[in-house]
Image (cartoon, coloured by chain):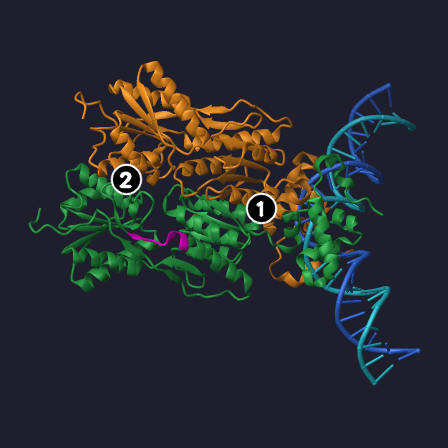
Chain colours: A orange, B green, C blue, D cyan
Amino acid sequence: MTCRGAYRRKVEEHRVPTIYDVAQACGVAPSTVSRAFSRPGRVNAETAARIRQVAEEMGYRANPLARALPTGKTSLLALVVSDVTNPFYFGIIRGAELAANEADYTLLVADVYESAVVERKALERALPLVEGVVLGTSRMSDSAIRVMAQQRPTVVLNRVLTGIPSVVTDNTRGMRSAVEHLAGLEHRTVAYVAGPEASWADGMRWRAMRESADELGLRVLRFGPYAPTLGGGGEAAEAVAASAATAVVAYNDVVAIGLMRALQASGVRVPRDVSVVGFDNIFGAELCSPTLTTVAAPLAALGAYAVRTLLAGMGSRTPPQVRPALLPATLVVRESTARRLRRRR
Amino acid sequence: MTCRGAYRRKVEEHRVPTIYDVAQACGVAPSTVSRAFSRPGRVNAETAARIRQVAEEMGYRANPLARALPTGKTSLLALVVSDVTNPFYFGIIRGAELAANEADYTLLVADVYESAVVERKALERALPLVEGVVLGTSRMSDSAIRVMAQQRPTVVLNRVLTGIPSVVTDNTRGMRSAVEHLAGLEHRTVAYVAGPEASWADGMRWRAMRESADELGLRVLRFGPYAPTLGGGGEAAEAVAASAATAVVAYNDVVAIGLMRALQASGVRVPRDVSVVGFDNIFGAELCSPTLTTVAAPLAALGAYAVRTLLAGMGSRTPPQVRPALLPATLVVRESTARRLRRRR
DNA sequence: CACGCGACGACAAGCGGTTGCCATGACTTG
DNA sequence: CAAGTCATGGCAACCGCTTGTCGTCGCGTG
């Protein structure tokens, strides 16, 4: 009999038990041990039970690498986020990780610092390891994503790409509730402070805002694009202050907070002079002052749903639903919005 | 000749090239191809160049799984964080990921929701895959960590564990600068709002505060422990307001912000009536109002340094430095601290 | 000119599982 | 009672790459 394990005799020190060790201890073939775990019905119940017990006693753990090699099942999923330090992702990561663990998968979070180049590199590194990919606000082009998607099952977050499963926040309804809220506070002229042009969500939000405003008979202005940062929001302050708008909806919370701070710094009071609404409800929206009224994206749900969609797609042969999943956004009213003052400032 | 690849004939569709394909195309043995990449000196320069070129043309990429199986080199590192949604980790994750990528490693971030059980499970799942582990504020016991550490090279963040390499913020000097700052503002009675008892950092911070206060001749009070959350900080407000303290240092920024909000809600003005100092300088410290004076932990540096230490330790045979690495913290003065009012409120 | 020695490639045995196929034996069925 | 069925376990090939070892060949040396 060939002495299996001779190869690594040098590292004999802390050998972890393998199916071969278990098999020997049980007096069965390694394949039987393997099957006892992976295909329980295939082996006699008693034998299986005995094997399991012995394995337990020996402290046997299947080596995921060895398992993955022939099967391709690494039990790894990648979540690519454009910026881990962006609070927008915290909830998403948490939700995704939760859903992944639930299905016995491990989530690989890759941070790409808002750079398409790094994104490509990270993907290249991770792709051979993972069974599927969730792209959170990817900076890559549509076509690049499509190429990706035929290498590994892919789900896109916050972006719609025909043919690729995607899950997005229901920006339209979210925005509508924000505008209705402002209309209810008697604002008549509202402004949108836009985020980066490349952002799919920005386009959706602006469109939804215009439409909602039209329907409700409000005048609507648009400023931007601005960078999706505190600084970006700050830059918008002057234009906003100079305009006739008494309320503004910002591309997202970070921009909204930047805007509020700059407005306040220049003597414009929020919400007394101008009401401000954000988007996403990030951690921090309730730290700022005044606390921020915002359209809450279902962050954790987004992440979890994306992972579940991915897993579902991996299970079945055919690429699943093409229709993007719309997850509801809800308006969270805090202190940054108020009834319009009768007298124009 | 045995027909390699027959095994997966069923999946013939999208075969990716292997060293066997490259070898055949070059008319050399697979082992030569392997060595052409992994041990460039071992094979004739011309041959190697030719192999590389052919490989390039065929689009060959080494399968990391297959490589990892015999060698154990997965090029994966785990970073365990107790709560991804805690802004404290953003910088750490970013720094760690940066340092990992730099060394051609991929970082696996595991979120454990502040639960020792989940932490153990996550570790169990990830351990066989990774070459090393960074434990960010682990909730596990010292002994559990030690057991872990002998399975895989480990570095601990923000905690000192004899025998295990660790990298920590220099809490002592950080706290000292905070207390000096307050003393400089003529505060005579200062309070510490404590975080969770299990926290190693909390102990360090409290001790450093007491010592600094003693040296500078300040009276020092202590409240807590409180949960390291906004709510936890809020709970402290009443006690703080009722005390003689005119300045408080909180366990961390989140607690500080919670405290400030609750103080303000009950009519205590910050910093006019009470100065507040936080710890960590998380994103959000400059969103709140007043913006928070805080001891900035070198977050990204912490993450990066931990990974580098880990990598260094993996390289050499002997477990490296035992002495914990102290990374400097710096006081960031913002709006939440001010000179003590002459008249007692 | 025989011998020794490096350099270079090939061979093959691993890493630790998975899985198609076969052998065996018990049990069912006509 | 013979033939067929099914449950069960074992054999061996295979995933793709690494690496110890060996054979070969060319060259320098005594």
Q: Nearer the viewer, residue A297 or D5?
A: A297
Q: Give the letter of the chain under mark 1.
A: A
Q: Residue at x 40, y 36 (%)?
A: A88
Q: Are marks 1 and 2 in contact (CB under 8 Å)?
A: no
Q: Nearer the viewer, residue C27 or A300?
A: A300
Which tag is nearer the camera, tag 1 or tag 2? 1
> Which stretch did the figure color magenta?
B295-301
- Determine the CA span between mark 1 and mark 2: 41 Å
Mark number, residue B287: none
Q: Residues within 10 Å of mark 2 (few under 14, many from 20)?
A: some
Residue A316 seen in this snapshot: yes
Q: Nearer the viewer, residue B256 or B177?
A: B177
Above or below for C23 versus B40? above
Seen in the image, is A28 located left or right of residue A323?
Answer: right
Percent of width and height locating residue B120: 48, 47
Mark number, residue A125: 1
Do marks 1 and 2 both belong to one polypeptide chain? no
Above or below for B186 versus A336? below
Q: Residues within 10 Å of mark 1 (few under 14, many from 20)?
A: some
